Image (cartoon, rainbow, N blue to C red):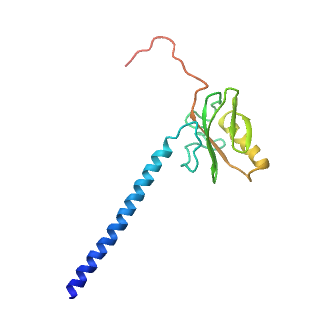
Amino acid sequence: MNVYRRVLLGVSFLLVWGVFGVRILAAQAAAAANAETVSSPDPDQEQVGAAPAIGGHHGDKVAGGLLGPDYVLGPEDVLVIEVFNLPEMRQVVRVENDGTISVKLLPHVKAAGLTATELEKELEKKWGKDYLEDPHVTIFVREAHSQPVSVVGAVELI
C-alpha cells in the first residue's frame, strides 16, 4: 500500500507541475505576441501602454532618435511622444502640413522648426501649466520625411 501511495503522489506531483508549466509557457507566448504587436505600431494610431521608445531627454546625445538632437522637425515627420510614468499619455503623431501636431489635452502645438528637445520643453511647459504636475516628456522621431536626401551625380557600386 505504501508503494501505491508514493506512485500516486508522484503522478499527482507531475500532473500539477505539468499544468502550471503549460500555463507559464502560454503566458510567455502571449507576452511575446504582445511584444511583437507593440514593436511595430501603425504610425498614425495611438499606442497606449507600449514599451518605451529609445530616445533621450533634454540634451542627451540621442534625444529625438537616431537623427540626433539637432534635427529640425518638419511636416510629415512621425513622432512618438511619451510622458514619464503616464503610459496613457503616450501617442504617435504626424506633423501636419501647417507644422502643428495634435496632442492630448492641448489643441494644435507648433512643432515644425523646433528640435525634438525644444518641443519636449514646450510640451512640458504647456502640460505643466494646467494639466500635469512636473511632466517629463520624451520625443522620439520615428520617421523623418520633412528633409529628404537626394544624391546627384554618378554613383559607383562597390
Residue 57's place in the image compared with 112, above or below, is below
Left or right of 48? Residue 17 is left
Q: Position of residue 94 (x, y in %)?
A: 62, 33
Q: Position of residue 122 (x, y in %)?
A: 73, 40
**Furthest-bottom residue in view?**
1
Residue 119 placement, left or right of 6: right
Image spot of residue 130 (x, y percent): 79, 49
Please give the name of the residue rendered at 57% of the width and 22% of the height, measured from the top-left corner.
148
Q: Position of residue 47 (x, y in %)?
A: 57, 45
- Rendered image quadrant of residue 74: top right
- Which residue is located at x 45 percent, y 54 percent? 31
Q: Quadrant of the C terminus?
A: top left
Which one is nearer the viewer's eye here, 75 or 67?
A: 75
Q: Quadrant of the N terminus?
A: bottom left
Residue at the top extreme of this rendering: 153
In this picture, is 146 found above or below 107?
above
Residue 89 relative to residue 37: left or right: right
Q: Is residue 120 above or below residue 26?
A: above
The number of numbered discs placed on residues in the rendered structure image is 0
Q: Nearer the viewer, residue 82 or 106?
A: 106
Image-quadrant location for residue 69: top right
In this view of the protein, which residue sits in the foreground, 1 or 83?
Answer: 1
